[in-house]
Image (cartoon, rainbow, N blue to C red):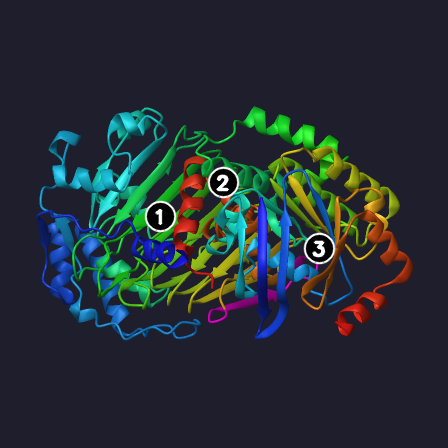
């Protein structure tokens, strides 16, 4: 579904991604790990079309479409979802209104009529249970006054509402306690099906105890330098990243 | 792609900008005593009204344009304005007699002039250029003793009420623009709600400037007698023209014991183009007096139009336990300038006022809140709470807050809160990532920000106002 070839991207003239390639097929979970500053978050930003980054070279296709030609909202409506590392607060805009607008935009894109109130409320209720989200949170403004854990849960809730084909979880585990981590991971696992895929970006192996990846990739200095299965994650946890850095430098 | 959308919306930005081809009776430009006599005679006014006009005119000659506002006002040549313009057919008795072009105009504006449309909920007085074109539902309202008519008709049929209350809240000496209005005002709306009557429908006046080089000077007078209630709406638009046009109106509200008046405005005069060319100069004096005990005035305004807005809907809280509210959303884009706010004058005991002002500035615009809260020595236990928020959408615009407080009574409590915020690129991107376009995201955020005020508007207006906010700000972030 997703094909990234020799991707180069920079911010303010500084190159962060330096020839990254990755293929994701339906039903797969890919974990992206790597030391600070390797370009993990840049990858999620570039995939979703954040205008802060310039793509200088390479290509990204999503189900055959050239992603780089699509606006961020088109990419979202094509079914790419990003669980933000730092979800922003939008004062005055209620979660209900926000979610309804998002759902209807997606439906419009698929040439479907707007969702009815009853269907929408039913969907909200169903998905809230899935991520064990408090009722009072959905009555508030988007992320306003949410704790760190609540924000992350809210991201997974939105993901459940929008049912993306490709979910990108950008350090969704950071700042979560064990209970919240379990809830978030359960949410992700329950949404998993043979048709969709996920890219899980994380620092630590911890999250991968709950979300079992099919592939683990190590991102270092803007490129994927090593790929493997979940055993690679254990190895990294045990040995750190230094041996990888050495391997790369020896090449 | 993004440019296409921007291009499209900048082309569409003011959809009321058409002119109507209507035969118009327009007097020559210029201002002097002869012109005032001419206006008065065209309207068949009684002697006392002409005297009032002349008195105001003579006073106006001694006045200077106020300079204290945070506005750059180009020099206005008062001799190059025509002070009276009227669609040539006068005083239609029924809709059949109204010029079909005129009906088309109001149709285009979405004004429910036709009776069946009006059945959907409001009585309308439509004012085109200088005269009131048609007031609907007059007869139905008359059964309840409610008077809702054009100002000219009120002068003719209810001279005692007009004499008693006209200029009782805004004296003819009040300020430069109010004085000018007193001299040359053409028409407007008049409302009287008798004792104990709750007006069963929204009353609404729709103002439209059509003719070239004319000013619009209307005045509205609303009197709510004891234990009565009325909700009143005002809307306004003008064609797109390269010249600036002057609008100087007066609104006066008198509220007796236990009565309540709710006054809502959606001001959408032509704001000028994106380079700041053309647009209406909107200099308006609006003031109400809570005359009796427990009386209440509520001003709600959504200001999106005009090249320059100078407007401070105010309340004199004279009656004990009276209360006043001011809810405002002022949006400026491109080169628009707005200096708007309110004055709350606490005179009676236990008087309360609440101010909620939301400014939104985009483009190169300047948006100021200016408010005075004054508590007189006798106003025991007066209470005021003011909140003034500013939202910035660009880094070239300005938001300013000028709160004045004069508190002369130590049992009173006056509070002021203010915030300034900016829509961030992160917020926009977050919405984009959820499939929401930038324009829609701004709409969501702005409407969320203005929600508290928009919620105060009557239902039909609230929806309209939401759309208007979005249209006004389209293509403004970046």
Q: Residues within 10 Å of mark 1 (few under 14, many from 20)?
A: some
- Looking at the rendered structure, whether the residues under marks 1 and 2 are on a common chain is answered as no
What subunit carries mark 2? A
As helix, strand or loop, the secondary structure at mark 1 comes to helix
Residue B317 in view (yes/no): no
Residue, disc 1: B165
Q: Position of residue B17 (x, y in %)?
A: 25, 53
* Residue shown at the point (15%, 62%) measured from the top left: B82
Distance, label 1 to label 3, CA atoms, is 63 Å
State which region is magenta: B395-416
Seen in the image, is A250 located left or right of residue B323?
right
The residue lying toward the viewer, choosing from B209 and B305, is B305
Tell us which disc is closer to us: 1 or 2. 2
Q: Which mark is residue A99?
A: none
Drawn side of residue A153 relative to residue B159, left or right: right
Q: Are marks 1 and 2 in contact (CB under 8 Å)?
A: no
Residue denoted by label 3: A85
Q: Kindly identify which chain the residue marked by label 1 belongs to.
A: B
First in sequence: mark 3 vs mark 2: 3
Q: Quadrant of residue B427?
A: bottom right
Which residue appears at 11% of the width and 47% of the height?
B22
**Vertical relation: B20 (above or below) B357:** above
Cα distance in 3D space between marks 1 and 2? 53 Å
Which callout, 1 or 3, points to the residue nearer the camera? 3
Q: What is the quadrant of the N terminus of chain A in the image? A: top right
Q: Residue at x 22, y 59 (%)?
A: B184
Determine the residue positioned at 43% across, 32% down: B195
- Magenta-colored segment: predominant secondary structure: strand
- Per the image, label 2 sits on a secondary structure element best described as helix
**Residue A105 circle label:** 2
């Amino acid at each position: 579904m997703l094909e990234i070839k020799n991707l180069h991207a920079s911010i303010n003239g500084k190159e962060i991604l330096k020839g990254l390639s990755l293929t994701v097929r339906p039903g797969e979970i890919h974990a992206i790990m790597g030391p600070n500053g390797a370009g993990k978050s840049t990858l999620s930003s570039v995939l979703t079309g954040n205008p802060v980054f310039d793509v200088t070279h390479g290509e990204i296709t999503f189900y055959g479409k050239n992603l780089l030609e699509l606006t961020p909202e088109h990419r979202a409506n094509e079914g790419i979802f990003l669980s933000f590392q730092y979800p922003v607060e939008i004062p005055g805009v209620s979660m209900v209104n926000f979610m309804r607008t998002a759902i209807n935009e997606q439906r419009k894109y698929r040439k479907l009529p707007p969702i009815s109130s009853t269907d929408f409320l039913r969907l909200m209720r169903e998905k809230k249970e899935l991520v064990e989200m408090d009722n009072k949170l959905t009555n508030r403004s988007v992320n306003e006054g949410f704790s760190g854990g609540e924000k992350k849960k809210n991201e997974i809730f939105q993901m459940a509402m929008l049912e993306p084909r490709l979910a990108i979880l950008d350090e969704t585990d950071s700042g979560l306690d064990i209970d919240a981590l379990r809830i978030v991971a359960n949410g992700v696992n329950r949404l998993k099906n043979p048709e969709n895929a996920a890219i899980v970006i994380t620092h630590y192996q911890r999250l991968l105890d709950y979300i079992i990846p099919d592939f683990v990739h190590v991102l270092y200095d803007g490129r994927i330098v090593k790929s493997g299965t979940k055993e690679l994650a254990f190895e990294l946890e045990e040995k750190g990243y230094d041996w990888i850095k050495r391997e790369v430098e020896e090449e | 792609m993004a440019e296409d959308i921007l291009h499209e919306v900048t082309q569409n930005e003011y959809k009321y900008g058409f002119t109507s081809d209507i035969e118009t009776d327009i007097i020559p430009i210029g201002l002097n005593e002869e012109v005032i006599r001419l206006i008065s005679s065209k309207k068949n006014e009684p002697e006392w009204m002409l005297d009032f006009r002349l008195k105001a005119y003579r006073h106006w000659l001694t006045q200077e344009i106020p300079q204290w506002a945070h506005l750059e006002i180009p020099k206005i040549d008062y001799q190059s304005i025509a002070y009276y313009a009227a669609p040539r057919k006068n005083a239609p008795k029924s809709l059949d007699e109204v010029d079909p072009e005129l009906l088309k105009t109001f149709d285009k504006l979405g004004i429910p002039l036709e009776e069946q449309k009006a059945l959907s909920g409001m009585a309308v007085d439509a004012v085109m250029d200088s005269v009131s074109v048609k007031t609907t539902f007059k007869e139905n309202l008359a059964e309840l003793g409610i008077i809702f008519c054009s100002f000219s008709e009120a002068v003719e049929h209810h001279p005692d009420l007009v004499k008693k209350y006209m200029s009782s809240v805004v004296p003819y000496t009040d300020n430069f623009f109010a004085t000018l209005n007193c001299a040359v005002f053409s028409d407007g709306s008049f409302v009287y709600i008798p004792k104990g009557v709750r007006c069963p429908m929204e009353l609404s006046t729709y103002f439209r400037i059509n003719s070239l080089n004319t000013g619009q000077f209307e005045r509205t007078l609303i009197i709510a007698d004891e234990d009565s209630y009325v909700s009143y709406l005002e809307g306004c638009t003008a064609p797109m023209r390269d010249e600036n046009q002057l609008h100087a109106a007066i609104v006066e509200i008198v509220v007796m014991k236990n009565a309540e008046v709710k006054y809502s405005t959606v001001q959408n005069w032509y704001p000028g183009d994106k380079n700041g060319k053309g647009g209406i100069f909107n200099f308006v004096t609006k003031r109400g007096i809570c005359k009796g005990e427990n009386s209440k005035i509520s001003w709600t305004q959504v200001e999106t139009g005009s090249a320059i807005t100078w407007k401070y809907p105010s309340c004199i809280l004279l009656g004990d336990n009276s209360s006043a509210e001011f809810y405002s959303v002022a949006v400026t884009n491109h080169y628009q300038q707005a200096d708007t706010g309110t004055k709350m004058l606490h005179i009676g005991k236990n008087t309360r006022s609440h101010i909620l002002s939301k400014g939104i500035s985009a483009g190169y615009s300047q948006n100021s809140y200016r408010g005075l809260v004054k508590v007189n020595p006798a106003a025991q236990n007066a209470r005021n709470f003011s909140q003034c928020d500013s939202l910035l959408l660009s880094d070239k615009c300005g938001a300013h807050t000028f709160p004045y407080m004069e508190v002369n009574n130590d049992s009173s409590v006056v509070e002021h809160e203010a915030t300034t915020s900016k829509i961030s690129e992160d917020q926009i991107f977050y919405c984009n990532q959820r499939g929401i376009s930038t324009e829609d995201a701004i709409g969501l955020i702005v409407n969320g920000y203005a929600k508290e005020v928009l919620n105060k508007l009557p239902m039909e207006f609230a929806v309209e106002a939401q759309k208007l906010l979005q249209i006004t700000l389209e293509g403004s972030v970046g």
